Image: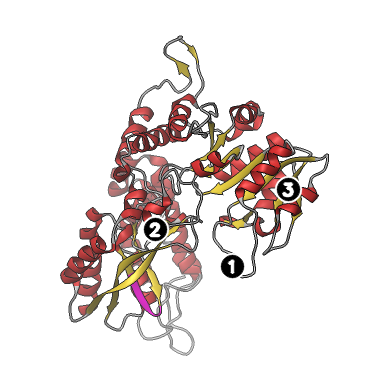
Amino acid sequence: MPTGRGIIGRMVPASPQSLLRKLPSVDELLRSPSVMTLVTRDGRAAVTDAARTVLARLREEIVAGQLEGPPAGDRGMNERRVELALAGIEDAVEQQLSRSLQPSLRPVINATGVILHTNLGRAPLSRQALDHVRESAQAYSNLEFDLDLGERGKRDVHVDRLFQHLLGPTNSQENTSAVSTIVVNNNAAAVLLALNTLAENGEVIVSRGELVEIGGSFRIPDVMAKSNAVLREVGTTNRTRIADYERAINDKTRALLRVHRSNFEISGFTEQPLLEELVELSRRRNIPLLEDLGSGALFDLQSIGVSGENGVLDSLRTGVDAVMYSGDKLLGGPQAGMISGSPDIVARMRANSLFRALRVDKLTYAALEATLLAYVKRDYESVPALRMMHLSKDEISRRAEALAKQVATSKLQVTVIDGESVLGGGAAPSAVLPTRLLAVSCGDLSSNELAAQLRAAETPVIVRVEDGRVLIDLRTVFPEQDEVLTRALNRIEAAHRS
């Protein structure tokens, strides 16, 4: 209904129905020259979806009254607002199309100082790993083909040989204890496979102090239940003795399980059996001992000042039958779950039909193989996560001071202060690495507002907010990202200045 004068002389707003009739159909919109250009470039299906989205949004705004003008004072205000929206509808379709075709998974700058940040993808891959993934992905490969015999092979041979080099033999005096390794899609899957293989319908003994919940609400008892193994808890939350394990052993016991506590510590009035005690018990009672190491390091953690944490080789040399650990944490490789241990036990797990459901693809094997080759060559500098762990406080301080000089202004205040980085990923939860932090503030922006603007940068910057300050830790910022970070800070300062 066109706008007209009411009985008291006021303008009668156009009804939503009359405004809705002004909107073009999807077909009409697709026939416009500029939208037809988009169809040629990006395909009819994608452009049609974008057009429908834009039109649906306009309909919602009209029905909700968001395009209405004031009830009096300007004839045809409602129509003019709709006309204005229609004039820009083709641009709106192009913008919607651009948003819909952009990847949702984006690179970000991790300025938190958490090296193995689970929410940010944990360990970044090395250049060598990326090159090997590209080579293996863009053509066929010998993933399951034995080139010597000309017949079907096994996919795990590509990394098992490297794990054998790095982990075995486990007894330097008796050169007989070899190690086998299989790979599944993450550490939870490794624990599931190990327990299902060795303890289905039987009992697994574990300390109450190790019944942990890891990221994403995954709990050890739940994983055990899915494996069809029965959980047998022993001891108390803070104190468990070797005698507790021994008393719990019965004819249904199939395994002993030791679990890394991951993201927390128990301190004070505590007690936990030595790993050597559990090994002695497992051998005396002929019950396999499994250890869920969680992160699992293949390098000496004491080299970065972390003590009291077993690496994979430490556990195997002590006598653990099978160790489960992650690929994208302290190892510094792709997401994967490894089971390393006695060849006989690992062979049983490989024969489990569950292994096929949990196995990894050629891309994971390629990235893992390249990462392990760096360990074989002792080229730890090429593995980004390891390089970050080994950065000294002085190295970080020099970069922080240089960056602060480039961005500090009257509006953008930047000071360099002492701080701490953490490993993350549940590895050594109490361990910290000394660092230097950039403490940043900008005019009257709150710390949360400044952090939000950094996240909204072209390359999002993820920071820490503590005690009302934005903190940036360059330990986890790649040196080549310093310039991008500087631009992001300067743009915020310039926008705030204007």
Image location of residue 158, percent across then percent down: 44, 26
Q: Amino acid at mark 1?
A: Ser
Q: Counting residues from the N terminus, which is met first, the one under dot 1 or under dot 2?
A: 1
Q: Look at discs 3 and 1 and give the one toward the viewer.
A: 1
Q: Residue drawn 54% across and 26% down?
A: 176
Magenta stretch, residue numbers: 467-471
In terms of sequence position, does the residue under pointer 2 or pointer 3 come before the other?
Answer: 3
Label at residue 267: 1
Percent position of residue 152, x then y: 51, 15
Instruction: Name the quadrant containing residue 351.
Output: top right
Q: Which residue is mark 2?
A: 305
**Element carrying mark 3:** strand
Q: Amino acid at mark 2?
A: Gly
Query: Chief secondary structure of the magenta span?
Result: strand
Pick the residue in front: 274 or 248: 274
**Left or right: 261 as drawn, with respect to 161:** right
Q: Residue 149, relative to residue 267: is it above or below?
A: above
- Give the x, y percent position of residue 355: 61, 31
Please, what is the three-letter code of the amino acid marked with disc 3?
A: Ile
17, 256: nearer the viewer: 256
Asked if residue 121 lies in the magenta stretch, the reply is: no
Q: Which residue is mark 3?
A: 205
Q: Residue at x 28, y 49 (%)?
A: 34
Quadrant of the image containing the C terminus? bottom left
Q: For residue 498, say whether it is visible.
A: no
